[in-house]
Image: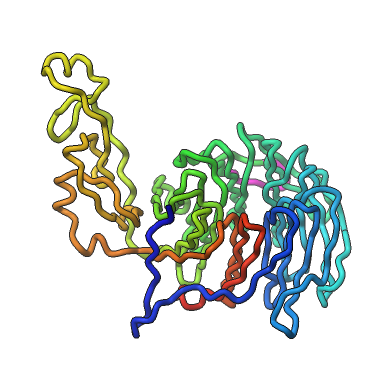
Amino acid sequence: MAAEIRPSQNKQGNTRKPVLISKLEGFQDDVNMAVIIPREDGVVTVSDDKTLRVWLKRDTGQYWPSICHTLPSEAASLTYNGETRRLFVGLNNGTISEFLLSEDYNKITQMRDYLAHQARVNCVKFSLNCEWVLSCSRDKYFQWHCSETGRRLGGYQVSAWCLCVEFDEQSKYAFVGDYSGQISVLKISNSNFDLIVTLKGHSGSVRSLAWDINRSWLFSGSFDQSAIVWDIGGRKGTAFELQGHRDKVLGLAYAAGCKQLLTGSEDCILGIWNMEADRQETPGWEESDICQKCEAPFFWNVRKIWESKTMGVRQHHCRKCGKAVCNKCSEKKSKLPILGFEYDVRVCEECYASISPEEKAPLATFHDMKHPIQYMFLEETRKRLLTVGKDRVVKIWDVSQVLH
C-alpha cells in the first residue's frame, strides 16, 4: 500500500507535480545507478549486464547510447565528476575502474584500476579537492585511495556489509551506512582515521545517504521504510524521523537551494520534505507492565492479571507522548507532521484532544512516480531528477514545479 499522495498546489490552485521528460529502456539486467551529466543532455548508467553506457539526447528528443562499454564484471556503482570528466565505476568483483570521457562524450578511455575490495563495491565517491576515491563494499570495508597515484591510503572495517557512503570535503568526515542499520562517522586523512561516533536509529539496513553542507545535516534512508535527519553540526545528538513511505527508502537527494529533501521508495512514491520547518524529535517509547493511562495489565504481567482477575491486554505506544497504552486508550489516529509522521498513526486519547488543526498541516508532499525507485540523482541547477527503478527503467523528470 502506497502512502497517501498529496501533490502540492500553486497559488492558482493548480497541482504541482514532477513532469516526465524521458525514459531510458532496453536494459537486459538490473540498472544499479545512473547520473546526469552536468550542463549536458546526457546520462551515464551502469547495470548488472556488465555495461557502462553514456546516453545523449538526439534531435528527436530521445536518448540513445553514444557509448556502450563492456566491463569484466557486473557494474554496481558509479560517480562522475563533470569538471574533469572523470568517471569511477565500482564492480561486483571488488575493483574500481577509472575512465575519462571525451569532450563530445562519444569516446571513453580507461585510466586506472583500483584493486580496492574483495566483494561487490556498493558505493564509490570521488573528492576532487582531496584527490581521494572513497568506496565501500560487501567485504565490510570502507576504503579510500589516492586518485593521483592509485595508492591505498586507509581502510575501516565494520561488522556488516557497507552499503553507502557520504563525504564532506570541508570537515573530511566520511559517513558509512551498513547492513546492520548503523552509520559510522569517521574523520579521515591521508594516513589515518578517527572514529567519531556510531549513529544508531534505524531498525533496518541503511541504503542511502545525503548531506547538507550548509547546516551539517546528514540524511539517511533505510530498509525500515523511514528516513532520519541527523544534526551532526549541532553536536547534541538531535535526530528527526521522517515517516511517509510504505516500503523501503532506497533513494535520497537533497536540494540545498530550497532546503527540501527528496526521498524515493519501492512503493513508487517520491516524497518532498520541507526541511525549513521547525521539527521535533520523535519521543522514545516508554516501558511499562501496565497501561500508563488506565493501568490495565499487559498480557505478560501475570501477577497483576491474577491479582485483578482481569484479562491481559496488548501493549501499544502513543506516537506523540511515547507512553505505553492499551488499545482502548489509543483508538484514535492522527497525522503528526511536526514529529515526522505524514500519515495517520496511533495516539492516546489525551494527546488526540490536544492536537490542533495547525499541527496536522502537512510538511511534505508525495507523488506517484509509477515505478519502484531504488536510486535517485538530482541536478539541482536545472532541477532535473533521475530515478532508477527496479523495473529496469531510468526516468528523467523536470521537478521545477515541486522544488520551490
Give the residue drawn at x 58%, y 38%: 179
The quarter of the picture where residue 357 lies is: bottom left
Image mark count: 0
The magenta span reads 186-192
Of residues 233 and 259, the one nearer the viewer is 259
Give the residue drawn at x 58%, y 69%: 385
Magenta highlight on residue 220: no
Of residues 239 and 362, the one nearer the viewer is 362
Image coordinates of residue 128 in percent, x first then y, are 72, 62
Specify whether residue 128 is in view: yes
The quarter of the picture where residue 307 lies is: top left
Image coordinates of residue 289 in percent, x first then y, are 23, 24
Locate the C terminus and report the quarter of the image it occupies. bottom left
Give the residue drawn at x 59%, y 50%: 173
Give the residue drawn at x 68%, y 54%: 32
- Does 137 sit above or below residue 277? above
Left or right position of 138 against 233: right
- Does 238 sit above or below residue 46? above
Left or right position of 24 against 17: right
Image coordinates of residue 168 in percent, x first then y, are 59, 56
Magenta highlight on residue 191: yes
Specify whether residue 230 is in view: no
- Does 398 sit above or below residue 70? below
- Does 320 sit above or below residue 276? above
Colouring of the image: rainbow
Image coordinates of residue 25 in percent, x first then y, are 70, 65
